[in-house]
């Protein structure tokens, strides 16, 4: 029982999605750019462009995500750092405070592929910057939606143990250095999801994300993400704040 | 006459490219930057005035709104498209020197970084402000920046980066430019940068937004 239970939770898992599987609407993409698709909106053309991007995406995204859940006995979480086996992540206090009560850790990556990136680049260097930008924003929203999906998969997998999940946290956020991505990828299978890291810790395809999610009985999700971030002049903060109003 | 220039500024700011363009809906069926600039040229308004008092004013307005978070990237891109449609009618006058740029800029995303949208928007806003921009693209090494500076003799070099792991590569560029072309200003920007970082690497100027760089150029470097 314990052995098969272990198998069901720990180790590497990979998922592939279709656009229709994602919780991603035209409105999400337009909000990503700072606007809304309300009725009578004078920027309705952005909503039309987002729909065009969605149409293009159907045959140009490759939505993949996956994670490795690391067993509790391999993990040591301190204030400001996380050790897994003999690798120490200098993930900084904001993040470790949120993972402190975790028992297991899921190291994840997700990607939307490079199809839209190529189309967007082409348009942006040519005559249609706006369409290129909307397609780029669509791809960004798509990979985030894949990561949302992964959180749900993880939740489903650990639920039988009575475990909850935290939010996801990424290298490059909350003072955790992007350079630590190489440590993170060292726990993922070789060429996981087709993602590669450059010497400057940039993932290719560009529309990819990586990070860690805590799992355990005493962890929980928090809804207000901007509160933990110190980037004051971020348009996301403005979008969140304008929604709250 | 100046009413026409004001109108040009307005349609650029609103992103009305030409009469047929569907957006913005409020200007449906009206002339856009294309038609109005053509008319201004035909009416004999000096092309330099059409540029400075029409097209550039429109881009400035949208740039300031963007800086103040009143509008977001899409509006800047549409305005730039309208500006471009108007510029088509002005461009021939660059050859005859009836119109001149304020100066020249070399721009690029630094080595190890492949992001170009931020740098593209920067370039558009500088062009929209009347500057000639030589865009070196992405993943540009210090040597390539230096070569471009030697070739184009720009007033300033603008560098962009989107990650903390790549912004550090700006330091080498600043150093190289300082050695090879001390009179060329170095301007840095991009999401992970701070004024402290820019100071540390001894760049001449940092701005979180392109408009800030444009204002600096206009006041410090314009001929
Ligand atoms: C959308 C987004 C994504 C998308 C798409 C990313 C992409 N590159 O296409 C996705 C979800 C895939 C993503 C992933 C990641 N991201 Co991200 N992302 C963003 C976000 C929210 C917006 C970026 C964007 O497109 N902005 C729009 C463009 C137009 O803005 P810009 O490039 O900054 O340019 C503007 C200004 O900076 C300025 N400017 C730019 N250059 C210059 C130059 C000069 C001279 C001047 C004056 C001005 C100037 O003018 C431009 C117009 O205003 C930013 C946060 C933010 N709010 O900026 C984080 C951000 C860039 N990401 C960040 C990080 C860390 C990551 C990841 C590493 C996280 C992870 N571990 O998964 C990955 C890396 C992906 C990879 N391939 O390696 C960090 C980078 C900072 C750092 N720590 O290094 C940021 C800043 C968020 C943060 N933590 O604060 N990301």
Image (cartoon, coloured by chain):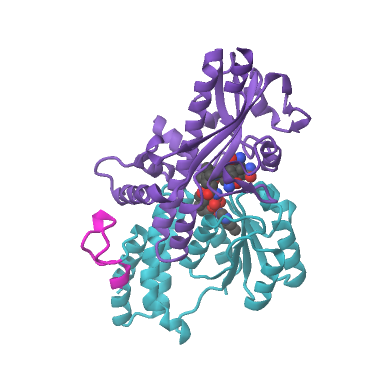
Chain colours: A purple, B cyan
Q: Using residue B45 as the reference point, say whether residue B130 is left or right of it.
A: right
Residue in view at x 57 percent, y 21 percent: A8
Query: Is the magenta region chiefly helix, strand or loop?
Result: loop
Per the image, is B44 magenta? no
Residue in view at x 53 percent, y 22 percent: A157
Q: Nearer the viewer, residue B65 or A58?
A: A58
Residue in view at x 50 percent, y 58 percent: B121
Q: Can residue B115 be seen here?
A: yes
Location of residue A181 by image quarter: top right
Location of residue B184 by image quarter: bottom right
Q: Using residue B90 as the reference point, say whether residue A207 is left or right of it.
A: right
Image position, residue B80 (x, y; %): 41, 63
Q: Nearer the viewer, residue B38 or A100?
A: A100
Q: Using residue A37 as the reference point, say whether residue A166 is left or right of it.
A: right
Image position, residue B222 (x, y; %): 57, 71
Image position, residue A85 (x, y; %): 76, 27
Image position, residue B151 (x, y; %): 65, 78
Location of residue B113 by image quarter: bottom right
Per the rendered image, the range of residues in magenta is B18-36
Q: Nearer the viewer, residue B177 or A187?
A: A187
Question: Number of numbered discs present?
Answer: 0
Quarter of the image with the N terminus of chain B is: bottom left
User: From the viewer's perspective, is residue A183 above or below residue A160?
Assistant: below
Outermost residue to the bottom: B96
Quarter of the image with the C terminus of chain B is: bottom right
Q: Can residue B69 be seen here?
A: no
User: From the viewer's perspective, is residue A244 above or below residue A139?
Assistant: above
Residue in view at x 22 percent, y 59 percent: B28
Q: Nearer the viewer, residue B130 or A194?
A: A194
User: From the viewer's perspective, is residue B133 above or below residue B74?
Assistant: below
Per the image, is B34 magenta? yes
């Amino acid at each position: 029982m314990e052995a098969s239970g272990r198998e069901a939770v720990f180790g590497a898992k990979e998922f592939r999605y279709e656009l229709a599987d994602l919780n991603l609407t035209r409105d999400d993409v337009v909000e990503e750019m700072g606007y809304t698709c309300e009725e009578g909106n004078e920027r309705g053309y952005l909503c039309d462009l987002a729909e065009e991007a969605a149409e293009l995406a159907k045959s140009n995204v490759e939505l993949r995500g996956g994670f490795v859940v690391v067993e509790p006995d391999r993990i040591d979480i301190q204030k400001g750092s996380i050790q897994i086996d003999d690798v120490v992540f200098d993930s900084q206090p904001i993040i470790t405070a949120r993972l402190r009560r975790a028992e297991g850790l899921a190291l994840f990556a997700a990607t939307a592929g490079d199809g839209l990136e190529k189309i967007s680049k082409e348009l942006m260097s040519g005559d249609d910057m706006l369409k290129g930008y909307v397609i780029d924003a669509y791809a960004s929203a798509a990979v985030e939606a894949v990561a949302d999906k992964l959180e749900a998969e993880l939740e489903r997998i650990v639920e039988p143990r009575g475990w909850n999940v935290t939010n996801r946290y990424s290298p490059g956020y909350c003072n955790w250095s992007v350079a630590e991505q190489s440590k993170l990828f060292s726990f993922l299978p070789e060429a996981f999801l087709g993602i590669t890291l450059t010497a400057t810790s940039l993932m290719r395809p560009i529309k990819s994300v990586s990070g860690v999610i805590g799992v355990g009985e005493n962890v929980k999700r928090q809804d207000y993400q901007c509160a933990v971030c110190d980037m004051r002049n971020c348009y996301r903060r403005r979008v969140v704040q304008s929604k709250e109003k | 006459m100046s009413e026409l220039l004001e109108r040009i500024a307005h349609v650029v700011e609103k992103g009305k490219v030409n009469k047929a363009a569907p957006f913005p809906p409020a200007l449906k069926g009206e002339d856009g930057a294309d038609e109005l600039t053509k008319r201004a040229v035909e009416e004999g308004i000096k092309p330099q005035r059409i540029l400075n008092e029409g097209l550039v004013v429109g881009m400035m307005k949208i740039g300031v709104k963007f800086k103040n978070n009143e509008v977001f990237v899409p509006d800047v891109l549409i305005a730039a498209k309208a500006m471009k449609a108007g510029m088509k009618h002005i461009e021939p006058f660059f050859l005859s020197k009836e119109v001149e740029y304020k100066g020249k800029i070399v721009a690029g995303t630094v080595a190890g970084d492949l992001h170009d949208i931020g740098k593209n928007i920067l370039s558009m806003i500088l062009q929209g402000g009347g500057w000639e921009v030589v865009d070196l693209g992405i993943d540009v090494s210090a040597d390539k920046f230096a070569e471009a500076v030697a070739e184009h003799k720009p007033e300033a070099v603008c560098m962009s980066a989107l990650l903390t792991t790549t912004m550090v590569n700006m330091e080498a560029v600043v150093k190289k430019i300082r050695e090879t072309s001390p009179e060329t200003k170095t301007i840095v920007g991009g999401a992970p940068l701070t004024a402290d970082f820019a100071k540390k690497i001894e760049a001449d100027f940092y701005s979180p937004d392109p408009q800030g760089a444009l204002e600096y150029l206009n006041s410090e470097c314009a001929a």
